[in-house]
Image: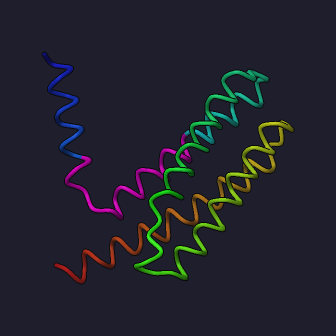
Amino acid sequence: MPVASVNAYRANQVSTISRGQLLLLAYDGIARFLQEGRAAMLERRHEAQNAHLQKAQDLLVELLCALNPDAFPELAQNLEQLYTYMYQRLVQANVEDNIAMLDEVSAMIGDLRETWAEAERQLRVMEG
């Protein structure tokens, strides 16, 4: 019974947060998977590396699919290009065991996260 309660709480939590907060959760997930993938890469644990980097790639695909070009066409196009680039870099980093490429994508995700977090803060100020 407690597991069902926890799952219901999580489902309610996700369904009641803003799109901006959901985006921040996705960026946090990508950052976490990149960090775990990086650690696995350094330790030459290839299966774990692949699993973590694929999870980061999966989140990038989700972000790509969630883009709404009708609302802000230029922003959607820019984010599509950025997400696609990061996805390709992660594939290449995984194949080549390239830490520098992982760090590049990690930095980009960090910058995006900070930008959206600031936008979320500004929105709350305007609404409150």
The C terminus is located in which quarter? Answer: bottom left
Left or right of 25: which side holds 73?
right
The residue under the point 58% across, 75% down is 77
Instruction: Tell which residue pokes out farthest to the top in this image.
Output: 1
Above or below: residue 111 compared with residue 33 = below
Q: Quadrant of residue 8?
A: top left
The region drawn magenta spans 14-32
Above or below: residue 82 compared with residue 37 = below
Left or right of 37: which side holds 13?
left
Q: Who is closer to the viewer here, 42 or 62? A: 62
Residue 80: within the magenta?
Answer: no
The residue under the point 56% across, 50% down is 61
Instruction: Tell which residue pokes out farthest to the front in this image.
Output: 70
* Residue 84 image position (x, y, % from top left): 67, 59
Q: Total label count?
A: 0
Residue 18: within the magenta?
Answer: yes
Q: Who is closer to the viewer here, 81 or 90? A: 81
The N terminus is located in which quarter? Answer: top left
* Residue 19 image position (x, y, % from top left): 33, 62
Q: Quadrant of residue 110?
A: bottom right
The residue under the point 56% across, 47% down is 31
Left or right of 7: which side holds 103?
right
* Residue 15 image position (x, y, % from top left): 22, 50
Q: What's the magenta bit mostly, secondary-structure-wise?
A: helix
